[in-house]
Every structure is written in structure tokens, then in C-alpha cells.
Image: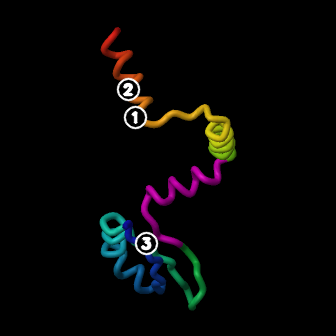
Amino acid sequence: MPRRTMTITVPAYIARTQLGSLLERVANRKARFVVTRSGKPTAVLLGIADFDDMLEELDPEFQKSLKAAAKEYRAGKAISLREYLKGRLGARRAG
């Protein structure tokens, strides 16, 4: 079972002095940090993959493609990965 990523709150003064350590935890342990100033959330420190995922989910074109794919799946137009790969490998061997 995948481990859930916990979001850790850290004051800005600690983030300033421990930035290298925080970046290591973000990169290697998939940690996420909310940086606070005077107790109020001010910024977020997270890995680039998480950031890319967030941007992708907000992209209207991506949302349209997800809806189209879901519609095709419900209409029975989907194939399994195994079937897809079998077809691709078969076509490659034939050609």
C-alpha cells in the first residue's frame, strides 16, 4: 500500500536556515511543507512531480481529454494495456 504524503508546517525562519534539508526531504522522501509567517500559511514547498500533477489537473485541455476518454471507456471502446501492447508488438514484428 503506498505511503500517504504528510504535509508538514514549518515557520519561515526555520525554512530559511534549513532549506537544504527541506529540499532533500522533498526530493528524496516526497515530503511537502507549508511555510508560515507569523503563524499564517504563506507558501508551499513540494516536489516538481506534485507541482506538474497539480498544473495538469487544472489544465482545461487535459480535463477535456479525460472526459473524452471516460466517455469512450463507458461506450466500450477501451482496450486493456495487454491488448494494446500485443497489437503494437505484432505490428512491429510484421513490418
Q: Residue at x 69, y 46 (%)?
A: 60
Q: Looking at the picture, which amino acid does disc 1 mark?
A: Arg
Q: Is residue 12 visible?
A: no
Q: CA distance from mark 3 to mark 1?
A: 31 Å
Which residue carries the number 2 mark? 86
Q: Could you tell me which residue is drawn at 44 percent across and 56 percent down? A: 49
Q: Amino acid at mark 2?
A: Lys
Where is 35 relative to 65, above or below?
A: below
In three-dimensional space, the C-alpha distance between marks 2 and 1, rounded to whole angstroms, equals: 6 Å
Side (left or right) of 22 relative to 54: left
Q: Are marks 2 and 1 in contact (CB under 8 Å)?
A: yes
Q: Is residue 47 magenta?
A: yes
Quadrant hosting residue 68: top right
> 25 or 15: which is nearer to us?
25
Neighbourhood count class around disc 3 (C-alpha, 10 Å): few under 14, some 14–19, many 20 upward: few
- The residue range painted magenta reads 44-59
Q: Which residue is mark 1?
A: 82
Q: Earlier in the sequence, mark 3 or mark 2?
A: 3
- Please state the horizontal and vertical placement of residue 13, each as a whole percent of the image: 44, 86
Q: Is residue 90 above or below residue 68?
A: above
Please give the name of the residue rendered at 30% of the width and 14% of the height, measured from the top-left corner.
93
Q: Name which residue lies at 41% across and 79% down.
A: 16
Task: Please report whichever mark, 3 or 1, sits nearer to the chain's N-terminal start.
Answer: 3
Q: Quadrant of the N terminus?
A: bottom left
Residue bearing the label numbered 3: 5
Quadrant in the picture for residue 86: top left
